[in-house]
Image: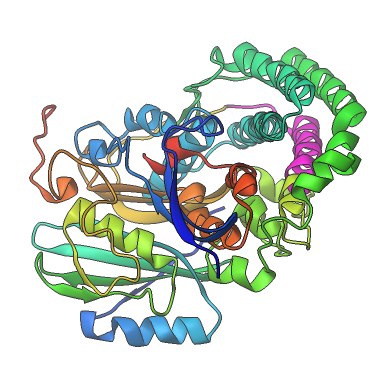
Amino acid sequence: MYENIEIINILNNDLLNHVLKFKEQGYRLIQICCTKLKEGLALDYSFGIEYKFVDLRMTIDDNEEVPSITSIFSPAFLYENEMHDLFGVNISVISIDYKGNLYRTAVKRPFNCENQKDEE
Amino acid sequence: MGKRSIVPFGPQHPVLPEPIHLDLVLEDEKVIEAIPSIGFVHRGLEKLVEKKDFTEFTYVAERICGICSFIHGLGYCQAVENIMDIQIPERGQYLRTIWAELSRVHSHLLWMGLIADAFGFESLFMQCWRLREKILDIFEMTTGGRVIFSVCKIGGTRRDVSTEDLNFINKVLEEVKLELKQFDNVFFDDYTVKHRLCGVGILTKQEAYDLGAVGPVLRGSGHNYDTRTLGYSAYKNLDFEPIVETAGDSYSRCVVRIREVYQSIDMIKQAIGKIPQGETFTKFTGNPNGEYFARLEQPRGEVVYYVKGNGTKFLDRFRVRTPTFANLPALLKMLQGCDLADVPILILTIDPCISCTER
């Protein structure tokens, strides 16, 4: 038995409006994650109400600024700092901003660099 | 207003088996604010998916954590199986459920021992961990491992369990249940235990929801939410109701976990009673091409796996949102207003797994 996942594609400019609507409808924040694409990054904001799972997806350029959603969903600060440290996502006005010190990595933006596939 | 001072807590502390740091802003003995720091041992396992064959990565996923290792492997497999539309044989699904619930029993017994040790009840710690050994013995008997099992694979399970062994598990679990009943009243009724847990670290129902808490932390605050009710593996065939407590304090979270031990034992017994004969895995060909979010219930709460494949044997992305990561904001709320002496106990009541968090 597999769960149905709803993915909604949005634009960066519409992010806060969508997130605010979810908040008003009683959704909770489940997770935020980032995926490296060939060009740019995909950001997934997942919300849930009871057992329903909805994902907001937007594609951004590497250096594009993204608004923080911590003013609407306060627990987002950890996810946003994580995306900043691992992928170099430029997020503005995070409520608790670690300024790149959440993860102590030897390489900057380690998840946003070309991977060397040694088994191909 | 008293003088404010900042006390660093961790990353090395007797109550913390793994490194996490908190800056505690104190006013006299009261915590006003706590600011967490993680990332001391971040391993970047998610990135490794781009270099490992997706079938082999199951064993990397298991190594995210030594306590919920089986469920990490299961979650990864479920996500890939959904993308590739692989149907798991019923017997494989039941075996997965049995091992997942055994993981919950041993994780909760481990936690009960740790919290007993934290409030200075060392004989209780010993009793909890002595019982846990019996569960680890079952793992060793059925999988060959006590920490990492490597029995879950894409398509089903690598091993079967004989009827004799299943009957033996049933017998051992009955013993565990009886022995746990002999001392669970210490957690439920003992004055000193209740003094440390009751009314401490209250997280209201609304706060738990707003802060994205999961698992026993969420259910201890009155939410009837358990991802197992989604019906993955064989859970759809088992009768159970999420364990819920309403007080939202440390005691509630403790009671939820103890009651879940009994519930898991009952679920394993149900699964043993219903498990059909047959194959334990389905053969498959090809590579995953697509994406999926899989959600499961770990001992510490809801865990989310995101897998994205590109049609090759290397995946584009594997992402885990672990329950401890989700429970950190709730912990910060619990710490506000507590006494400095209660901080170690409060941290333990979310059952933190830094190994999961630092995947």
Q: How many marks?
A: 0
Residue B228 appearing in the image: no
Residue B313 drawn above or below residue A48: above
Q: Nearer the viewer, residue B3 or B283?
A: B3
Residue depicted at 81% across the width and 23% down the height: B170
Residue B74 position within the rendered picture, expressed as x and y whole percent measured from the top left: 50, 37
Q: Nearer the viewer, residue B159 or A24?
A: A24
Q: Is residue B185 magenta?
A: no
Residue A6 drawn above or below residue B97: below
Q: Looking at the rendering, in which quadrant would you find the C terminus of chain B?
A: top left
On the rendered structure, is B53 left or right of B72?
left
Residue A29 position within the rendered picture, expressed as x and y whole percent measured from the top left: 47, 68
Magenta region: which residues? B255-279
Residue B219 position within the rendered picture, expressed as x and y whole percent measured from the top left: 70, 58
Residue depicted at 55% across the width and 63% down the height: B333
Is the stretch drawn in magenta largely helix, strand or loop? helix
On the rendered structure, is A100 left or right of B181?
left
Residue depicted at 16% across the width and 45% down the height: A110
Q: Looking at the rendering, in which quadrant would you find the N terminus of chain B?
A: bottom right
Q: Nearer the viewer, residue B58 or A32?
A: A32
Residue depicted at 57% across the width and 52% down the height: A1
Q: Nearer the viewer, residue A36 or A80?
A: A80
Residue B74 drawn above or below residue B151: below
